[in-house]
Image (cartoon, rainbow, N blue to C red):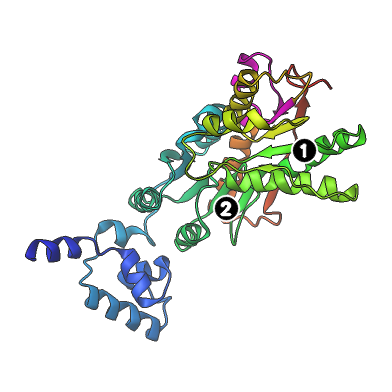
Amino acid sequence: MKEQAKDSKKRVTIYSVAREAGVSLATVSRVINESDAVKEDTKRKVQEAIIKLGYKPNAVAQGLALKKTTNIALIIPDSSFTYIGKVLNGLLDVAKIYKYNIILHTTSVGVNEMNEIIDNVIKSHADGIVLYNDLFTEKELQILRGFEIPMVYLDVRNSGPGACCVYVDYKKAVHDLVTRYLDRGIEDIVVVDDKKNPINVKEVLCGVEEAFAEKGKKFEGFIEIPENAHSSYDYLKKYFKVNRHKLIITYRDSQAIAVLNTCAENGISIPEETEVVCVKSSRYTDMVRPQISSFVVPSYDLGSLGMRILTKMLNGDHIQDKEFKLNYVYKAKGSTRY
């Protein structure tokens, strides 16, 4: 029992205090640092929570509100390593100019993983955050915003309060693509689910649905991958044994490659019977056969522009437009007929 009590006490963090007092992490940090910017009743609530929980402020917590380190936290999912190379080059080139250090944090799916990343961001005393990740829940994003640290989202149109974003309009890209197919009389169109990129897949779906709605039609072609599926490949292999479609759209390259392989294994000819488009291009879309039609985006600019915007935020410059849209180019290759 004593061991359990000891372990429980060790787990008391600044998050626990903020939750108990019903305030933000930044407010707790200000109270710890004896800032005058906190109202007396709020300060009292925080102090009472600290005493109740037995929280011991450490150097990390005490540095949250006061220290400037020139550290920038870059948060990316491990599933994005395929795409991050040029983005990272652009970000690092600009960071060097302004003498900022980039601290890389990688994430995978899981609540504990996300909480650990948030804790590591605190410990790094980051002055700003670049977020190349759409796996964070709204609750987790609220925690990050609670630090009141400048944030820039990359490749996701989701700036949130006080943050900026640099993105590609995948919704319009897919909308225009689907409209061209509908104009040719091709309506048997489906979108493959992608659990690793939920926000961007939602944007893709919105683009398809709008294109159908403009033609007076309803889109019902979403291929949802069950949570208990071992992999997209395993599910799609069974799916294409009994299903055929004219156009299959995926967001990520590995999903598109899974479609190519499972279609081939089920005797479906590409692009003669079925066409395949991958929204987000990578080097792998050119390495397979047939090469996969996709949208090419300026990845280097994504990173460099994101970092430039963050430096302006850190300098206190007023940024009127919070959203910065980059262009894209559609490249038809061997997986489509047009």
Q: Residue 108: x and y, percent?
A: 43, 41
Viewer-side residue, 227 vs 175: 227
Q: Residue furthest front?
A: 242
Relative to 184, does residue 267 appear above or below in the rendering? above
Local secondary structure at mark 1:
helix
Q: 10 Å neighbourhood of mark 2: few (<14), some, or many (≥20)? A: many
Q: Depth check: give the residue in front, 10 or 249.
A: 249
Q: Position of residue 20 (x, y in %)?
A: 34, 75
Residue 212 on image: x %, y % = 84, 46
Residue 15, picture quadrant: bottom left
Against 58, is 123 above or below? above
Structural distance between the alpha carbons of marks 2 and 1: 29 Å
The residue positioned 75% from the left and 35% from the top of the image is 327
Q: Residue at x 43, y 45 (%)?
A: 70
Q: Please tell me whether residue 4 belongs to the stretch shown in magenta.
A: no
Q: Which mark is residue 313?
A: 2
User: Helix, strand or loop at disc 2?
Assistant: helix
Chain part drawn in magenta: 275-299
Which amino acid type corresponds to the residue marked 1 in the rendered image?
Answer: Ala
Total count of labels: 2
Mark closer to the observer (2, 1): 1
Q: Which mark is residue 212?
A: none
Amino acid type at mark 2: Met
Q: Earlier in the sequence, mark 2 or mark 1?
A: 1
Residue that protrudes farthest toward the left in the picture: 2
Query: According to the image, label 1 marks what residue?
Result: 173
